[in-house]
Amino acid sequence: MLVSKAEVAVETVDVLAVDDEQVNLLLLSGLLRRQGVNIITARSGFEALKLMPKHDFALILMDVMMPGMDGFTTAERVRADETTRHIPIIFVTAISKEQRHVFKGYETGAVDYLIKPFEHGILKSKVQVFVEMHRQRMALKQAGAALERTVAELRSSALALSDSRARFQSLFTSMFNGFALLSFEDGALSGLGLSRIVEVNPAMEQIIERPREALLDKHVGAVLPNLEEYWNDFVTQVARTGQPAQFEGYLGELKRWLRVSAYVPGPNLVVLVAEDITPRRKAEETLHERTFQDPLTGLANRALFLNRLDQAMERSRRRLNYLYAVIFLDLDNFKPINSSLGYASGDLVLRTVAERIQGVARGLDTVSRCGPDEFGLILEELKTPGEALRVARRIGLELSRVLDMDGHQLHFTASMGVVLGPSEYAQPEELLQDAALAMEHARALGGGKIKVFKWAMRKRAQYALTVHQSLHNALERSEFRLHYQPIFNLVDNTLAGFEALIRWQVGSILVPPNDFVPYAEQTGLIVPIGAWALMEACREAARWERDFNLPKNFTIAVNLSAKQFAQPDLMRYLARALDESRLDPSRLKVEITETLVMQNPESVVHKLRGLREIGAKVSIDDFGTGYSSLAYLQRFPINTLKVDRSFVSDMDAFENLVIVRTIVSLAHNLGLDVVAEGIETERQRAFLADLSCECGQGFLFSKPLAQDRALEMLGICCPKTGN
Ligand code: C2E
Ligand code: MG
Ligand code: MG
């Protein structure tokens, strides 16, 4: 820093006056005080020398003639000292101006003489000159020091500058974000593609996957030829307006997502700072996929399906004549795949099915996996409703193609429900529900079928729901009753047993089982209802056992539904019913339908063995309707076949006659006895008796009887001896 003149001017200057005469010293002090000079006095040469180190004298005024050390000697000493030799000395002397003295004076480096008595003005002006010189020297010295400080400061700030530049450089090179300086030589209008790359940092080299040399001076368009238009829009906007901005963009060629900040550092320049956000975007995409995609098949999941359906419904509301359709598809025979071939095979099947369905669907359709083996399709922009059915049929055909699974030749069929839009739905869920309902109807037809949704189906479903509620209440309010239909021995007309048949007492009306058992079966309520029937039948039969003289093979037959039979704790509650009622187990005959047996023979065989262990008997109900091979039955531990009513009622038809005869003779070969259902005429009875059919049941003998009427019949047929 430079020293200002003002700072120099205020400095007082020391002048040394050396004289052995006190008077002379006082005189000098008095003369020079007003010149801004500080007179320091010494009475001898020695004293003067002692003062030298303490002051920076501008001048020494020295008497020559002094006792001890004279002026010249003192001057020599002053000159001899490196630190004081520059100090000018004016000899103030009374000695005449002789050459000798003058010479000697100059030898010692004196600058001037003043001969006493001197003129005051001369003294003052001479002193003034030296003082001024001193002052200038001082100023120069200070300026030099200041300059030196400035130089030092400059030097250190230059160091700092280069330091910060180095720091910047290292930041620039090591920074995680990519940096690129672009120049728009022909202005922003020429577009991002024609901007030139002026500078890039290593992070940017990595992002672009090209070395610096391959980037510098190149046009952006030459480096990234396939940039989407929105990149250009974004960068040129920043270049044009000078407003910094940020956006997220995708570099398709490099499969990278970047968050880019752009600003303008100078005319025709744009800086892009890019952060690679690909990992974050990937995570977001995975999240999105997890939320909206079925991980196994890659299809849309239920949530996305409903979302798309909502959009289709909205379109149909806004556009006249907009036709769309929803297909709900359920594989008919998928469930056993997992249990027999394993889950990996099951997964493969589902993936193949997904692919085949997708192969049929068009690009604008949505295919989704809505449940474990359920798929949903939204068919958009249909020309006719018939188109939806054609698609459904093609899917059916695709699925029926053989699928080879580790040597297993698998065939699939699917039940499909179709809803044709536009329809009046508020929510997509409702529409999907109706498609599923239509599918249920298709499935009830035996698989591989397609059903279009009709409002009547909804009514039936709603009715089922109401029935379910009512059945639930009926159970709580004990509205179920058992009626008992007698079964007679056709050979000797003795009472062979009863079949317990359930009824629902609604006020004075008795609802027959065909009107509610199917619903109870659908909703699962048949399980508690059937359990009640079983318990009730066992209790009643145990009472008969106590009160009547029941024939040896007398049984009470109880119907078990498929759902009931599938219950894992079936054996437990059967055993409990027998235990609690104290009924002889051999009096209990369980009736299961032939269809149930054929659907899942393996697990049925297992349970039937359990029944035999308990000591109960088993009867196959409605026999002849389930197309089972009689030989097959050999494997089952059963006691009785019940010939279905349909054959008995129409035995005049030759075909039925043959069937009944065959059933009876084959049953006998297997060691089973036969009960014929629905005997309504004497002719039927006689005919069956001729065929050696053991037992019969039907309106000819008796309709199902209420509890008290059954007791009456028992009283007549099996009275206790002694009564
Ligand atoms: P099912 O087990 O085959 O019962 C025989 C059905 O045939 C009874 O109908 C009976 O009344 C009827 N029937 C008997 N003889 C004749 C006849 O000569 N002519 C005609 N036309 N019909 C005759 P119901 O009582 O209406 O029972 C119908 C079905 O309901 C039963 O068929 C059985 O499958 C089911 N069911 C009845 N009670 C129960 C039960 O407690 N649990 C379960 N799961 N199902 C039951
Ligand atoms: Mg039955
Ligand atoms: Mg039957």
Image (cartoon, grey):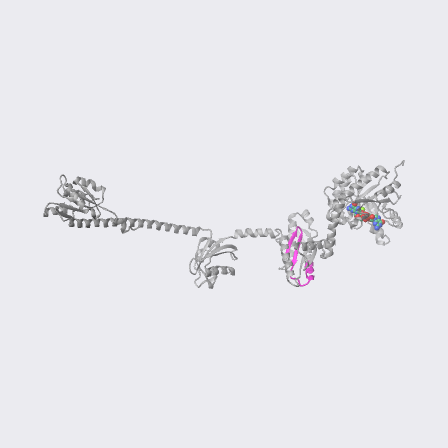
Looking at the picture, tell me which residue is in the foreground, 589 or 402: 589
Please state the extent of the stretch shown in magenta in the rendering: 367-393
Judge whether residue 383 is colored magenta. Answer: yes
Looking at the picture, tell me which residue is in the foreground, 38 or 483: 38
The answer to whether 293 appears left or right of 86 in the picture is: right
Question: Residue pushed farthest top?
Answer: 722
Looking at the picture, tell me which residue is in the foreground, 297 or 431: 431
x, y (%) of residue 26?
17, 43
Judge whether residue 390 is colored magenta. Answer: yes
Residue 131 visible (yes or no): yes
**Residue in view at x 50 percent, y 53 percent:** 276
Looking at the picture, tell me which residue is in the foreground, 1 or 652: 1
Q: Which quarter of the figure has residue 454?
A: bottom right
x, y (%) of residue 402?
68, 54
x, y (%) of residue 625?
79, 51
x, y (%) of residue 480?
79, 45
The answer to whether 407 appears left or right of 287 in the picture is: right
The answer to whether 194 appears left or right of 564 in the picture is: left
Residue 630 visible (yes or no): no
- Count of numbered circles on the image: 0
Quadrant where the C terminus sits is top right
**Residue in view at x 89 percent, y 44 percent:** 493
